[in-house]
Image (spheres, rainbow, N blue to C red):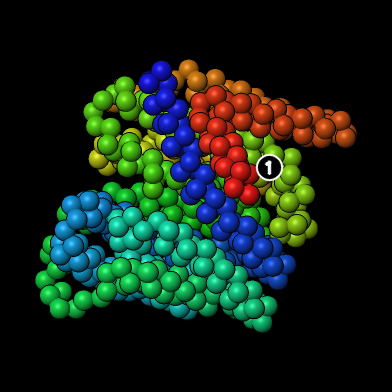
Amino acid sequence: MELKEKQTDAYSHVLKYTGIFGGVQGLNILVGLVRNKLIAVILGPEGMGLASLFNSVVNFISQATNLGLSFSAVRHVSELFDRGDEAEIAHFVKVVRAWSLLTALAGMLVCVVAGPLLSSYTFAWGDHTLHFMLLAPAVGLLAITGGETAILKGARRLRSLAVVQVYSVLTALVVSVPVYYLFGQAGIVPVIVLMALATMLLTIYYSLRLYPLQLRGARGVLGEGMGMVRLGVAFVVAGIMGSGAEMIVRSFLNVSGELDTVGLYNAAYMLTITYAGLVFSSMEVDFFPRLSAVGVDCHQLSLTVNRQIEVSLLIVSPMLAALIVLLPVLVPLLFSAKFVPMVPMAQVAVFSMYLKAVSLPISYTNLARGNSLGYLLIEAVYDIILVLLIVVGYRYLGLLGTGVALALSYLVDLFIVYLYTHRRYGYRLSGAVVRYATLQLLLGAGVYAAVHVIDHWVGWLAAVLLVALSLAYSLFVLHQKTSLWSALTMKFRKRFRHG
């Protein structure tokens, strides 16, 4: 009985924090959807494609020059925070801020110097060197934001981080729409810089309240951060590969197709990969620390990873099935009628998220064990496969082929991640994971087939019923494995009595 209660509490914990952090991301996404709708109407696919190219370049340079401080600093600040040594924390905060400033200056310099190269590589028309040089401040601001965010994460200020995210999205809505309306595509670069500035100001507002800026004793602190920098190098390389792959993909689509194609691809990517990923937002904050605490116990490692996979699958699967049905309606509403051609691609790409729900928790095993080399190798293989599959898919099937490529790349990634983790750490997929994944994938495939094969209202009715079945199954299993229903019932009873 005691073992069953522990298992129930474990599942409830995973479900609780997945819901909390997913809820914050969901709110951000809802505001972002309104913003994207307005921008899509103002700029159209071509303008959104141009913004996507500039943003991908800024992210690439930021990842290449920030030394991974936004990740590695979290671990060091967190360790000091657990010890409760305020003097040591204050001193290490100086180290983080000094390195953040250094990486900000380095990133800006790289952006300015590499401007001509970026212009000739990214665009097949026109000279955009000045645009890339003007984006340099955004790179510097992102570096400072990364350091301050790491401080807040390490000090467990999750509420402050959530508030920063919400206000950043609201600011983006209030600032970007008027600028785009007045200046059109000419406002893209200013908006990117203004958004980076707004996010930085919001972040440092909370971080400086927690740890005020202290210049005294800051001399020589750069030499103390080498351990943090070495830890972040692997994540820098992985970030470079990931951002580089996305930049290559968008540049290829821009050169091989048209700028409209980049805009359509980016919109479909946001709807499937980014928006569906809100369920996975708790991984870094909650799941990763728990997995790190497991140690070398192979059984406990498998148990922890499998529980996370089960909850992620059960939550995300009904959402994905519903997304397949609703995309033809959502796209004109969220963007405009010009974006309808990307619906078939997005519907296929949805299946990549089923696979990610399984592969992502497994991939955190290498990070939890400090195996940076294994993590880098797997990321490198995935990025290469992604680019190759998208090139082949687009040439043979057009935009639809890019959706097929995304799904296939995640399938290959799952196979590689599982095989590597199984052989190195003895990890095994549980029977429950295999059962849930198989059933939900079949239901998702049934929804897709009903929408595309049965060209009649009967097909849509069958798709809706399958979505309902997916939701009912997930709720049934979550009810069996967690105490959530009992907790909610008790809360409503208390309110009813006091009401």
Badge 1 amino acid: Leu
Res. 323 in view: yes
Seen from the viewer's position, the closer of residues 399 and 356 is 356
Neighbourhood count class around disc 1 (C-alpha, 10 Å): few under 14, some 14–19, many 20 upward: many
Relative image position of residue 121 (x, y in whole percent): 47, 63
Spot the residue most to the bottom: 182
Q: Position of residue 491 (x, y in %)?
A: 56, 41
Q: Residue at x 43, y 54 (%)?
A: 244
Q: Is residue 384 left or right of residue 399?
A: left
Please, what secondary structure does the residue beneath circle 1 have?
Answer: helix
Q: Residue 43 in the image: state x and y as whole percent.
A: 68, 69
Residue occupied by mark 1: 323
Q: Which one is nearer the viewer's eye here, 1 or 270?
A: 1
Residue at 39% over, 44% down: 286
Q: Residue at x 60, y 70 (%)?
A: 173
Q: Position of residue 53 (x, y in %)?
A: 53, 63
* Picture layout, residue 161 above or below residue 480: below
**Is residue 252 or residue 457 the one in the foreground?**
457
Q: Quadrant of the N terminus?
A: top left
Q: Is residue 92 shown above or below 4?
A: below
Residue at 33%, 55% in the rendered image: 156
- Residue 80 appears left or right of 321: left
